[in-house]
Amino acid sequence: MTFDYRGIGGSSPSSLRGFEMDYLDWATKDLNAVIGELAKDARPIYLVGHSYGGHAIGLLQNHHHVRAAYTFGAGAGWHGWMPKLEQLRVRIMWNVLAPTITGAKGYLGWSALGMGEDLPLDVYRQWKHWCRFRHYFFDDPQYPKLQDRFDKIKMPIKAVNAADDKWAMPALRNTFMSHYRNAQLQMIDLYPADHGLKNIGHMGYFFGSASGLWDDVFTFCESQ
């Protein structure tokens, strides 16, 4: 099953201006509802997540229904381990581009810049706030019990990140995924050249040229 989080794609209102939500809703409400629906069937459930999808596993209330999870490009958003030039770009994004766009539109309308989906204002604000911290939302004093929730996750998780992913490089993956302290965790670095690719980056897993990367997803799930 594939789906759109609230505020995204087919789950977006006619306008994101004034649309209110909590960033964690994507996991605690949306993904939780998807898992709940799938659990009505007797077949095993495997979760494949990208970026935030790797965060969402630890936020699920009904994670016990999921047999195993495979993630691409998940990591803490802290800029400190990024290359210097990317650090500069991130600072410009957070401090110049994003405030200008959200001020004009009332949401992060950056699809026109080719930078991804438009995001609700609350998602933008929380994302920006958490990216200030080395350990992302685990360091946010407003959410002191998130680690307790992540400690309940005991499923096998394979976390794969491209070595050329400047937004979720392996160091950022290691920082975030280490909070799945009781999971059966594998962390794998992907080098584009090893797979006949010039680059993968943060979104390259979904390009047709990288379809071979998904063979390992099915192999992993079938082995669980």
Image (spheres, helix red, strand yellow):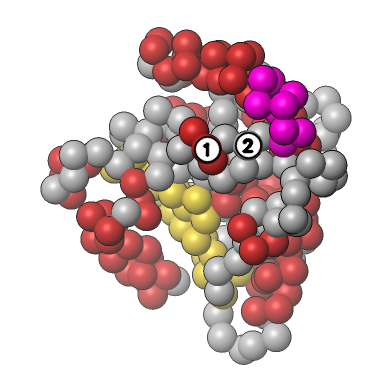
Is residue 209 shown above or below 103? below
Name the quarter where the C terminus is drawn: bottom left
Looking at the picture, does residue 193 appear above or below residue 32? above
Q: For this view, does 141 lie left or right of residue 47?
A: right
Main SS of the magenta part reads helix
Q: Residue 127 location, x and y as percent?
A: 67, 32
Number of numbered discs on residues: 2
For the N terminus, the image quarter is bottom right
Please state the horizontal and vertical placement of residue 184, each as a whole percent of the image.
Answer: 51, 54
Residue 52 drawn above or below residue 42: above
Residue 36: mark in rendering: none
Label 2 secondary element = loop
Q: Is residue 159 visible?
A: yes
Q: Is residue 130 visible?
A: no
Residue closer to the observer: 77 or 128: 128
Q: Which residue is mark 2?
A: 109
User: Which residue does the image show at 84% across and 42% down from the upper left?
Assistant: 18
Label 1 amino acid?
A: Ala
Specify the quadrant of the image occupied by residue 189: top left
The residue at 74%/69% (across/down) is 33
Residue 218 left/right relative to 167: left
**Residue 102 lies in magenta, yes or no?**
yes
Residue at mark 1: 112
State which quadrant residue 109 falls in: top right
Q: Which residues are magenta?
A: 99-107
Q: Residue at x 55, y 69 (%)?
A: 2
Q: Magenta includes 67?
A: no
From the top left corner, tell me how far across and down residue 31 is, in percent.
Answer: 68, 62
